[in-house]
Each structure stands twice: as structure tokens, then as C-alpha cells.
Image: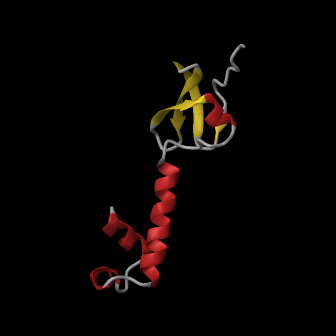
Amino acid sequence: MSKIDLTGQKFGRLTVICDAGRNRGHVLWRCACSCGNETIVFSGNLRNGKSRSCGCEHAEKARRRWLHKHKANPSPYLADRYEGGSIEDLEDLIR
């Protein structure tokens, strides 16, 4: 069975750069993420949508959930620093 060349194709935030070999018979691809990182991904995970970023997308979603939760009900520690501030100020506190 010949492999499908995915070089140059885009899957979510990932753009396939080149073949990265095989792992237990599965084709691997080196990909560039739109955030600037590179990652190696299984071919099947790219094609079925399981891998869409280097992990940055998951981290951003987690940060948004955390901010939503703590903006609505901030702890006293965060409230002191967030009072009158913007959402960007709160984001700076958690970085």
C-alpha cells in the first residue's frame, strides 16, 4: 500500500512540512503549527481531524474556560487584582 503524500496540506492549525518516517507501520508527518511550534503527527490523526494543532488550541480553550469561571466568581486574591481591570489584566495574572 502506498502512502498518500500530505506535504503542504493544512489540517486545522497544522501545515504538513515533510515525511517524518514511520512508527509501528504508521506514517508520521512533521507539521508546522500556526503558533510557530513544530510537531510530529500520525497520518491518520491528521486525516480524521483528531490532531488539529500542536496542543496550543487545547491550552487556549482551557485558559478561556478558567478565565470565564474566575471572572464570574473570582477568588479574593484575584478580585483584589482584578477590580476595575480588564480581561487582559486577569490573563496576565495567570501567565
Which image quarter holds the C terminus?
A: bottom left
The colour scheme is: secondary structure
Residue 94 in the image: above or below residue 68: above
- Give coordinates of residue 26: x percent, y percent: 59, 23
Q: Position of residue 2 (x, y in %)?
A: 71, 13
Q: Is residue 76 above or below residue 91?
A: below
The mark total stands at 0
Give the quarter of the image for residue 63.
Answer: bottom left
Residue at position x 29%, y 85% in the image: 76
Viewer-side residue, 32 vs 52: 52
Locate residue 5 relative to residue 30 in the image: left or right. Answer: right
Image point (46%, 39%), residue name: 36
Viewer-proximal residue among 44 and 9: 44
Residue at 72%, 13% (x, y): give it: 1
Q: Tell which residue pokes out farthest to the top in this image.
A: 2
Relative to 76, is 48 on the left or the right? right
Relative placement, left or right, of 75 versus 60 is left
Expressed as whole percent of the image width and height from the top left, the position of residue 84 reads 37, 86
Residue 51 or residue 81, whichever sits in front: 51
Residue 5's x, y, as percent? 68, 20
Picture quadrant where residue 77 is located: bottom left
In this view, the residue in front, 30 or 25, is 25
Q: Residue at x 34, y 86 (%)?
A: 83
